[in-house]
Amino acid sequence: MSPLASYVVQTAVTLIGVGAVAFVLVHGAKRAGVGRATGPLDVVGRLPLDARRTVYLVRVGEKIYVVGASDAGMVKLGETTDGALFPKREGAGQHAG
């Protein structure tokens, strides 16, 4: 095998090895939960108004905040309680019939 061919094979094997190690690290980190959101915040609703404007419902504990997002930033539009927005109905799992 010529020196050039040997160099190309060695470079390809090294590149494949580095790619495999990177894939394993990224996959392992994803399974371990690295990068996931944690804490008391939860986005419970999203309404895109147009390409650059969206309204979000964000739950923080027992309160739900209505937040508007656009290119200019984010602004609180209002707030409500969890029970007012999602009332608990008796027999929610039962069907009439």
Image (tube, rainbow, N blue to C red):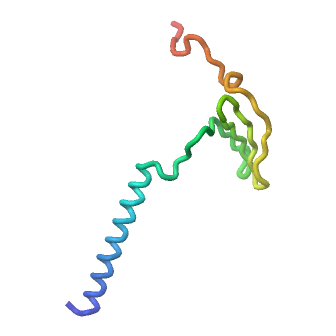
Residue located 74% across and 48% down the image: 69
Specify the farthest residue to the top.
97
Q: Is residue 59 left or right of residue 73?
A: left
Q: How many marks?
A: 0
Residue located 79% across and 35% down the image: 78
Residue closer to the observer: 40 or 81: 40
Image position of 28 with respect to 93: above or below? below
Q: Is residue 34 left or right of residue 18?
A: right
- Location of residue 44 in the rendering, given as x and y in whole percent from the top left corner: 63, 35
Report which quarter residue 89 is drawn in.
Answer: top right
Residue closer to the observer: 91 or 33: 33
Q: Is residue 97 left or right of residue 89?
A: left
- Location of residue 10 in the rendering, given as x and y in whole percent from the top left corner: 28, 82
Residue located 72% across and 45% down the image: 54
Specify the farthest residue to the left.
1
User: Which corner quadrant holds the N terminus?
Assistant: bottom left
Residue closer to the observer: 69 or 76: 76
- Location of residue 43 in the rendering, given as x and y in whole percent from the top left corner: 63, 39
Q: Is residue 9 left or right of residue 77?
A: left
Report which quarter residue 6 is drawn in.
Answer: bottom left
Image position of 10 with respect to 54: above or below? below
Residue located 25% across and 93% down the image: 3
- Location of residue 87 in the rendering, given as x and y in whole percent from the top left corner: 66, 19
Report which quarter residue 12 is drawn in.
Answer: bottom left
